[in-house]
Amino acid sequence: MGRIAILGGTGPEGLGLGLRFAMIGEEIVLGSRQAPRAADAARRAQERLRVVNCTTPIHGEENQAAVRGADLVVIATPFAGVRELLPPLAEMLAGLVVLDVVNPLIRVDKQFTIERVPEGSAGEAIQALLPRSAVVSAFKTESAESLNAIERPGAGDIVVCSDHSEARTRIMALAERIPRYRAVDAGPLINARSLEAITALLLNINRRHRTVTSIQILGLQK
């Protein structure tokens, strides 16, 4: 069992990932700018886990306190906040694997699309902000609604990309410990650009068909 800090852990995506990781035995710390908010989210998450007979601890802390002692850090904040959040934490995150689940989404004519990011993608922007960390983009196409529905197993493929092969392998192994998920190695971090665009497409499909979708990559021998 490791210790995973989730920055943005009080939001629906971060909280859903925290619940799923707790269910496979990982100790979770939910980070927030406000410690009381993080503590309250952790208390509610622990109550939800008891319903599915999971006793793995979840704690809540202010962001800097959450990072201390973590083996893995997840960035699950809105993209608009990463350039303010991450630079003060860069030294603390040096040498760590950082899992990026951020999508730079905007709305244009009632449709989701991807904001133009100078670095190319949210994943690449986060890597630029954390040059001494190994950033891995993954879980971007998994909806918060599905992640939080812990009474049901997840389903689909988790596409994983990073410029750091060992970190990519580590996140793939973590994803595949969650029942019914398959990790797909998508190579270097530049492919986060395509991954984030797929997320926008899925959200538009969800809205049009009033459902929750994910992806599966066909043709792989695995």
Image: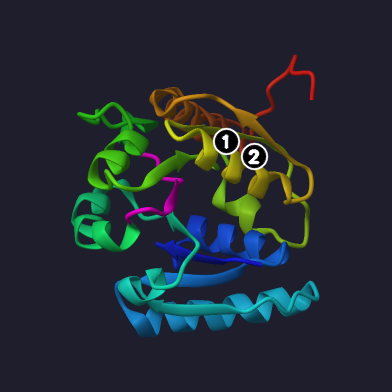
Which residue is at 78% across, 49% downward? 179
Q: Determine if residue 140 is in view.
A: no
Q: Nearer the viewer, residue 76 or 25?
A: 25
Residue type, mark 1 in image: Asn
* Residue positioned 39% across, 62% down in the render: 7
Which labelled disc corresponds to residue 211? 2
Which quadrant does the C terminus fall into?
Answer: top right
What x and y, as percent, mark residue 23?
Answer: 71, 65
Q: Which residues are magenta?
A: 94-104
Residue in the picture at 36% in, 71% down = 32
| Residue at image coords 38%, 24% | 190
Residue sitting farthest toward the top: 219
Q: Is residue 170 above or below residue 199?
A: below
**Of residues 28 and 81, the one drawn nearer to the viewer in this rendering:** 28
Tell whether position 2 is magenta: no
| On-image quarter of the N terminus | bottom right
Q: Say whether residue 213 is left or right of residue 204.
A: right
Q: Residues within 10 Å of mark 2 (few under 14, many from 20)?
A: few
Q: Is residue 130 visible?
A: yes
- Asked whether 96 falls inside the magenta stretch, the response is yes
Say which label, 1 or 2, has the lower sequence index: 1
Crowd class of label 1 (few under 14; some 14 to 19; many from 20; radius 10 Å): some
Q: Is residue 215 left or right of residue 86?
A: right
Q: Are marks 1 and 2 in contact (CB under 8 Å)?
A: yes
Residue 3: percent from left, percent from top: 55, 68
Query: Please, what is the three-letter code of the amino acid marked with disc 2?
Result: Thr
Name the one closer to the observer, 56 or 37: 56
Instruction: Give the number of the disc on residue 75.
Output: none
**Element type at mark 2:** loop
Does residue 27 appear to the left or right of 9 in the view shown?
A: right
Q: Is residue 11 left or right of residue 205?
A: left
Return the mark for residue 206.
1
